Image (cartoon, helix red, strand yellow):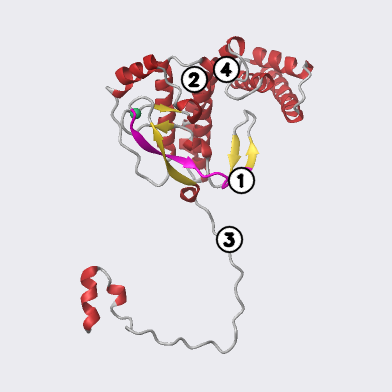
Amino acid sequence: MGILSGLSAFGLKNLQDKSIYEEEEKQPEKKQEEEPKKPKILTEADMVYDKTFECPVCGTHFKSKVLKTGKTRLVGTDIDLRNRYDVIDPYKYEVLMCTKCGYAAMPKYFSKVTSSQRKAIMDQISRVITFSVPEGEVYDYEEAISRYTLALACSMVKKDKDSTKGFICLNGAWTVRGYREYLTANGEAEKAQELYQDELEFLGEAYKGFLEARSKEDYPICGMDRYTIDYLVAVLAYYAKDYETAAKIVAGLLNSNMQNDNLKERSRELKDLILTTLKEKKEK
Ligand SMILES: [Zn+2]
């Protein structure tokens, strides 16, 4: 009670029992040993921020979540060159989406829009689309995967290069895989298993895109040199059970004068994997 009791009306109830004037704190007689400071454990929300972009289709300034640089630590790389990081899955944040007109694309390709592509996006996407603007601190996996689907739709409408569409599908597959790993780690193995078909579908479309690009487009393709693309197409062929193509491309890689030791080692491992799979198939 007293003059501070009115504070509760302001929602400041926690202050009403405090004394108005600070009492001098008694110094502890012995100096306590200071505990070593624990490093702050970073969460996903600590690692992203809202960045403002200008939409090349409708001209609106909108916010999209992007990764802060230097906060992630690489913990491994999958057979298809998907990088794994601790704490955060960066592939969740690789699609920019205009919150006004719904145009979506991966950052590298976002602003590259010709006037006819702009018109096509407005006619076939913006006029039709309904969506809710993301409000959370981070993107959840369902949201992230649907952003890839939308980016793919925009890419189809824009009639992008095969490699651009393939790259969206590849990153979409990696995001589905991240989701599956997340679900498995959280006791939802069954749901994770159900999503495997989605991952394979994305990988299959990535295979088609890069296989076409490999014979039609100039290098670098999506920032990758000829050897890296060859390796990637071979892995994707393997996933698609097109073992003949996979084996042929890997043989070409191992006979080439590729200087990248890491990729050479990976190509050898892929060759072994293909041989083992073919052997198992024969035995069945
Ligand atoms: Zn827009």
Q: Is residue 146 above or below residue 17?
A: above
At a point 22% along the width and 82% down the height, the residue shown is 3
Q: Are marks 2 and 3 in contact (CB under 8 Å)?
A: no
Specify the amino acid type for callout 4. Phe
Q: Position of residue 282 (x, y in %)?
A: 69, 16
Specify the amino acid type for callout 2. Lys
Q: Position of residue 56 (x, y in %)?
A: 39, 26
Marks 4/1: CA–CA distance: 28 Å
- The tag earlier along the polypeptide, 2 or 1, is 1
Q: Which mark is residue 84?
A: none
Instruction: Write down the residue under mark 1.
Output: 73
Specify the amino acid type for callout 3. Pro
Instruction: Write down the residue under mark 2.
Output: 165
Instruction: Write down the residue under mark 3.
Output: 39
Magenta stretch holds residue 71? yes
Instruction: Write down the residue under mark 4.
Output: 210
> Residue 163 is drawn in which quadrant?
top right
- The tag earlier along the polypeptide, 3 or 1, is 3
Marks 2/1: CA–CA distance: 28 Å
